[in-house]
């Protein structure tokens, strides 16, 4: 299963707005996508509430994983999303 490790770029971490944007993008991907803090248990990236339970702060590394056709493309897009400061957009 392909994975990507990315540092959270939003200055407030994965609070409601960035978590919602990630969940929407993961849900629209059409593949099962998980996210986990390094060494933690993965959660469904398409669930805003589960993403928020990670309590990921700015600079924390998370691991995205997906399985299926186009998984590499989906993970690249989601990693790029998380690396941005979504609080400024």
Image (cartoon, helix red, strand yellow):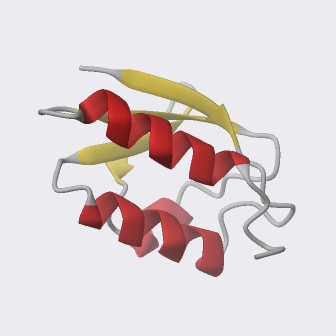
Residue 20 in the figure: left or right of residue 25? right
Residue 42 visible here: no
Q: Quadrant of the C terminus?
A: bottom right
Residue 73 spot, x, y in % from top left:
35, 35
Q: Nearer the viewer, residue 4 or 62?
A: 4
Q: Is residue 36 above or below residue 54?
A: above
At x 63% / y 33%, what residue is drawn? 6
Q: Work out whether 35 lies above or below 86.
A: above
- Residue drawn at x 62%, y 51% as measured from the top left: 82
- Residue placed most toward the observer, 46 or 76: 76
Quadrant that contains the N terminus: top left
Relative side of 15 to 73, left or right:
right
Say whether residue 45 is left or right of residue 67: right
Please identify the quarter of the rendering in which residue 80 is found.
Answer: top right
The x and y percentages for residue 34 are 33, 44
Residue found 75% across the figure and 60% down from its top? 13
Which residue sits at x=56%, y=54%? 54
Q: Quadrant of residue 2?
A: top left
- The x, y position of residue 70, in whole percent, is 22, 34
């Amino acid at each position: 299963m392909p994975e990507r490790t990315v540092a959270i770029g939003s200055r407030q971490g994965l609070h409601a707005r960035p978590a919602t944007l990630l969940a929407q993008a993961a849900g629209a991907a059409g593949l099962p996508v998980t996210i986990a803090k390094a060494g933690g248990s993965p959660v469904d990236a398409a669930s805003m509430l589960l993403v928020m339970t990670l309590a990921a702060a700015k600079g924390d590394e998370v691991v995205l994983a997906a399985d299926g056709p186009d998984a590499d493309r989906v993970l690249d897009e989601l990693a790029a999303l998380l690396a941005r400061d979504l609080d400024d957009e």
